[in-house]
Amino acid sequence: MQSLAGFLDIVILFGTVQGLIVSLLLYFSNNNKTVNRLLALLIFLLTLASLNIWLLNQPWYQTPFFQVVSAILPMVVIMPVGPLLYLYTRKTLDPEFAIGKCTRVHFYTVAIDLLPHILALCYIVGVFMGALKNNPQPIAAFIDDYNVYADIPRWLSLTLYLAFAFKHLLAYKKTAIDNTSRKARWLQQLHIALGTFQLIWLIYLIPYVVPSLTDKMLLLLNWYPIYVPLSVLIYWLGFKGYIMQQHQSLMTVKSNKPLIELESATVNEISASLLRAMEEQQYYLNSNLSLNLLAAHMAVSPKNISIVLNQHLKTNFNDFVNAYRIGAFKEKYGQPQYANYTIIGIAFECGFKSQPTFQRAFKQFTGCAPTDFNFSGM
């Protein structure tokens, strides 16, 4: 049994070392800083909890000095993991998504993780200053009980934010042209992996929070049923996260390559054809319109259309088409023949295929939701 425990401790230690290395590499990478730092912090917090369990299993860590260090230093900080996952998902799918002061509210629940360490610090300071008696048993018992039940909001928080993140991913896949892109596949794998871990945690957590079973669970299984899978998750996160960072770096290098130049006459001809296709022929009303379909109508290669849109008109295909659809929506809204239509009904008449796509495009071009727009001021 001791040899098995020693082997499992080595597994946890290796996961901890890799997690620390990868989180540092991601945090200090030069590309996609915000996205990589969110993932780095997520991996680091999981790694910190894994390191804590490894330390608690070491005999030398049971000395009075390290017990004081363990009481004061917060290492199991799980409440921010859910918000970090959610923000990482949003920022990965939408680089324009702004992470500002309003997002701080997601991290206020970290107080649940910090409370026992604050109490321990106050007790130690109180004893040192002579304001409290040197009797640690009551506060130690309270902190032990608190840490048992603190796992409930930790599990709930990560589960809820995982659900929010996955819901956002599903909405993205419904509206994106390339819903099987590398980042979409990676996020789906990440959510499935974390969901699997949450299920394992729940199976352990249910008997663990029953007072009569808590000590028996720890004596029989310790924390290995949770932290060995967590170490495997850290291994996988580190490997996949670093691969994604390298992929993003490669994409950045490719994006910095010299632009493909078209002759001026070709640019003018394609630009004029694009305007005719939208303004005269109103191809944007076709909800199934794609770059390849438009290129076939114009008898121009999709690559050349993309070059003109990106390099000369400073837009992309989706934004180019949606701008006309939003313009058509604002023209139709309020007209008598559309009096019985809902907002979404009019949006569908203008070429939009789904409500989320319309709402996102409307906010992009007007700065507000359709219900908040002042149509009378147009």
Image: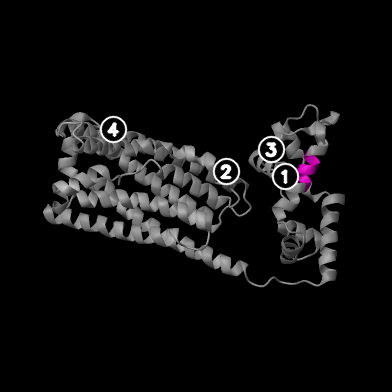
The verdict on residue 93 being magenta is no
Q: Residue 112 or 172: which is nearer the viewer?
A: 112
237 up-or-down from 311: above or below: above
Pointer 2 residue: 171
Q: Amino acid at mark 1?
A: Phe
- The residue stretch that appears in magenta: 324-329
Q: State the residue at coordinates (76%, 30%).
A: 341
Q: Quadrant of the C terminus?
A: top right
The residue positioned farthest toward the right in the image shown: 280
Q: State the residue at coordinates (34%, 44%).
A: 77
Determine the CA span between mark 1 and mark 3.
Answer: 8 Å
Q: Amino acid at mark 3?
A: Cys
- Camera-near label (2 vs 3) is 3
Q: Residue 341 or 23: which is nearer the viewer?
A: 23
Give how far across and how far down residue 320 sits, in percent: 75, 53
The crowding category of the residue bearing disc 4, from other C-alpha atoms within 10 Å (few below 14, some 14 to 19, many at least 20), is some
Circle 3: element type: loop
Earlier in the chain: of badge 2 and badge 1, it is: 2
Determine the CA span between mark 4 and mark 1.
Answer: 47 Å
Earlier in the chain: of badge 3 and badge 4, it is: 4
- Camera-near label (4 vs 2) is 4
Pointer 4 residue: 149
Q: Residue 14 or 108: which is nearer the viewer?
A: 108
The residue positioned farthest toward the left in the image shown: 2
Pointer 3 residue: 368
Pointer 1 residue: 365
Circle 4: element type: helix
Marks 1 and 2: in contact by CB < 8 Å? Answer: no
